Amino acid sequence: MKKQFFLFIIAGLLSLCVTRGTCAQPFSDNLPEGKLIKLVAAIPFTGVPREDVAAVNKKINEITEKEIGVTVEFPALSTSTSGNNYYDKVTRLLSTSGQLDLMLGGYGSFMEAYVDKKLYPLDDLLLKYGQDIIEQVGEDKIHCCDIYDVLYGIPVNGIYTRQGNCYSMRKDILDKYHIDPEKIQTMDDLEHVFEIVKSGEPDMTVLAAGADGILSSQYYLNTSCGIPLTANMNYGTDEEMVCIFESDEYKEALKRVRRWHVKGYTNEDIFGETKPLSVRVKEGKIFAYTGSRSWDKENDIFTVNGIEMVRISLDKHVVNYNGYGSRPYVITRNSISPEASMKLLNLFYSNQEIADLLCYGIEGVHYEKTEDGHFTYAKGRTDNPFLNNRGNMPNQFIAHVWEGEELDYWQQIAEQNETAVQSERSGFNFDYSKVEAEHREVVNIYNLYKKILNNGLDNQEECRERMLKEMEESGLRLLLKEEQTQYEAWKRRKL
């Protein structure tokens, strides 16, 4: 009897180790008194030299050690110009038993980490150690990172409004043909501009693809996480969820992009192009390129490699369905101390000095303050490597603003987030763990076809039907049914 009881106790302890990570890294609610805790936090400093990250890391540790008895290490996870570099490396790190306490769950890694059982639930930790986070972010937005009513992430405080169907055009070409960008209000207006430029500049690519392709700039392709599989249409305001590939809107967009390709507006060598957009703009090879944009002034003017560009959008300001849950900060099962991790997050969201270090680097090295309170380039510099990563940082709203932005810029951003069109799916996070194999297969199939479809390179209807047939054979209907079931259950819980 004693032997059986002993075995029962051992089994229980092993079960606890499995659910909480590894026995070598136990969870403890009691933080050690007077002992310095070293945490590891994965944050994408894309394109920032490691020596600059290390210098900022040292400055941040001077604050965190004094405030909460914690130091933090930022591992070298993202050094290329692509967010995929960060995603790939952080996914590999999560698959090991190595220490990783905090990470930005962006670039699709949030739900993947949840499905892989790598995330730590945060409700109790937030209430105990994250009061400043609650005040800064707001409970409604925080709980957009709930899965089955359990909190697994903390949204960043930053720009969530997006406009799709966005086009950046060379201002000198617009001026040359007396085209007023403010009069480009419809897709017909846009096609008329393309026709003028194609006729007058036959050697120039009229429209180049940004990101995954020309079609990816369309709003409804930005309404789902991972792949554009399902969405609420009409800017996310329809309650019914549909398969995006079977929608009339998607079919019409495919026809349009195919027409642009046939007319010679788009780049013939989509697969072979290796030069960045900025270089091709500078070389005079591109008139316009696609994308989506964050909140900005209408028809704003900016420069690319010294070339003035005008950016317009034909869609509304929208907070996408998974907006607030698209890139949360999470605590992982590999953490040596979830409590210390939440304390560190709380400091990241409440300490302005840390926010400035993460968003802009070190004063006098990476930036300088202007007399009116802006930040600008440090003397002798024309770049700031941290600036392009600002959108990934925990609480941008408490950071200073960059020169050229209005001093109440972050207040304007917060107001825009509130007043933009909000998706009916905001806060719904699809757990595909029950259909993980089908999800993986469907994603792989889409990745094979998306460049062709998104750039109009084939008979679009035949290509779409071929892709759908392969998806059907790989379990598309089962995947859609599971997502619909979870979505309806989530809607009932909201009532």
Image (cartoon, helix red, strand yellow):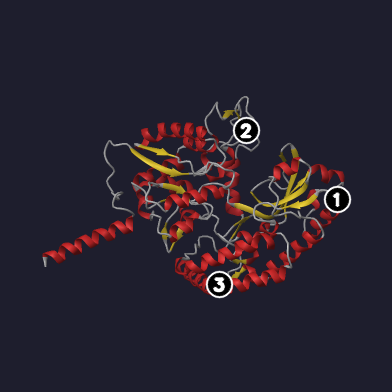
Q: Earlier in the sequence, mark 3 or mark 1?
A: 1
User: What amino acid type is highlighted by mark number 2?
Assistant: Asp
Query: In terms of depth relative to the viewer, which is nearer, 475 or 393?
Result: 475
Say if residue 264 shows up in the picture: yes
Q: Nearer the viewer, mark 3 or mark 2?
A: 3
Left or right: where does residue 75 sit relative to residue 460?
Answer: left
Determine which of the numbered discs, if any, sits on residue 394 in the image. Answer: none
* Residue bearing mark 3: 476
* Rendering quarter of residue 152: bottom left
Q: Residues within 10 Å of mark 1 (few under 14, many from 20)?
A: few
Q: Reading the chain from its start, which is encountered first: label 2 or label 1?
A: 1
Residue 324 in picture, x, y percent from top left: 52, 54
Q: CA distance from mark 3 to mark 2?
A: 46 Å
Mark 2 and mark 1: Cα distance apart in space: 35 Å
Q: Is residue 122 left or right of residue 260?
A: left
Residues packed near mark 3 inside 10 Å, few (<14), some (14 to 19) or many (20 plus): many
Q: Which residue is mark 2?
A: 383
* Tag 3 near tag 1, CB within 8 Å: no
**Percent position of residue 411, x then y:** 57, 43
- Residue drawn 82% across the image and 42% down it: 172
The x, y position of residue 436, in whole percent, is: 47, 66
Q: Which residue is mark 1?
A: 202
> Where residue 63 sits in the image (x, y, percent)?
41, 33
